Image: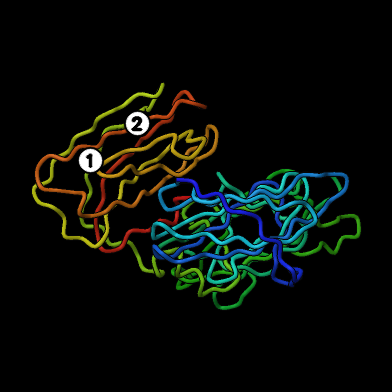
Amino acid sequence: MRLLLSLLLVAVALPLRAQDTILRHDCYLAFTGQKGEMASFAARAIPRAPYHDDLQLLALDSQSREVAEQVVPLGTEAKMDVPLQTEGLHVLAVTTGQPVAVVRRTNGPFALVASEQTPLNVCGGFARHYFFVPKGLNRFQIGVSADVTGEGARLGIWSPDGKAVVDLEDDFDTLQRLKVEVPAGMDSQPWAIALSKPQDPKLVLDDVLLWLGRGLPPYLCEQPEWLAAFVGSLKPEQISLHVPLRNLSLTQGGTFTVKFALEAAPRARMAALRAVAQDVDYPNEGTFTLNGSKPYAFPLTGDGGSLLVTVMLKPEDLRAGENVLEFKHDNRASAAMGLTQMEIIAGDEIHLEEAW
């Protein structure tokens, strides 16, 4: 169900602050909450001559359903309230076109999404933000690009003990995948990253594309404690049940049935379907039911993109004996999508860090 929200102009201007990130093109804000809560956002659509695109905001719930949308005319400020109808991870898709914007949640933690499939596009400085390095990860990559001649950036990365592990100034005309070693004892903690103006007078700081590499939850937060809302309270996963399923290609609006058996219904706190999804272009392109449940939907991967996704299930939807998954493909705008390495999992701690 889509809830169309009317535009409410803010009487008091939304001031730019040092930690505000100026977004451009397509960006995503992740946020969490409980069913029945209200998530509030403030947005400012900032002109950038000679472009005239209005700011577009679209909220998706934890099952990838569109639940709210709003247009913020260029040169105005607005606020947007999103009533949460499901609990867990939600996302606010921000589309600026060629102008730029500031968008932030005003009544709770939020994170900027920065994965290789959905990179963060910023314009200007990027104040220190925090990301989480999971336990056991001994190296990771950061992707950076500022591919317009004459533009560049200075990239800083700090380990949890405050030491600068990267201090690099470059034009970044081609995408750089920076490899960072994780010193002993520095995993399972927040790290910090920032972009600043180059010291080289021949370089200017403008558009920069940034993403966190494989193995890193793709969330950047202004406050390190906010990360707990997005990475399972920083606890390792605790999965007690793995049920592998066959690969599927969902095509041409068809329906596909997969069956599996359980000796007993799991008593775990959480359950999910996890898979590598490919070419999920729009919300509800791929949906499924479990034993006649309400439909679940796969998160977006982008056109031709692949992403490890985790779709949370109601544990009570699983039962002893035969279980039936019925997958459906919506082919109104796409011919096919794929699912590989698919499995049903259950346990007391399951992470959604790769869901967006």
Q: Amino acid at mark 2?
A: Lys
x, y percent for residue 253? 39, 24
Other-residue count near label 1 (Cα within 10 Å), few / some / many at <14 / 14–19 / ≥20: few
Q: Nearer the viewer, residue 284 or 204?
A: 284
Residue located 40% across and 31% down the image:
338
x, y percent for residue 18? 74, 72
Sequence-first tag of 1 and 2:
1
Q: Which mark is residue 292?
A: 1
Q: Amino acid at mark 1?
A: Gly
Find out whether the residues at labels 1 and 2 contact each other: C-beta distance under 8 Å: no
Locate residue 62 relative to residue 82 in the image: left or right: left
Q: Which element type, helix, strand or loop, lies under badge 1?
A: loop
Residue located 70% across and 67% down the image:
20
The quadrant of the image that shows the N terminus is: top left
Report the Cα–Cα distance between label 1 and label 2.
13 Å
Q: Which mark is residue 188?
A: none
Q: Nearer the viewer, residue 202 or 309?
A: 309
Q: Is residue 169 visible?
A: no
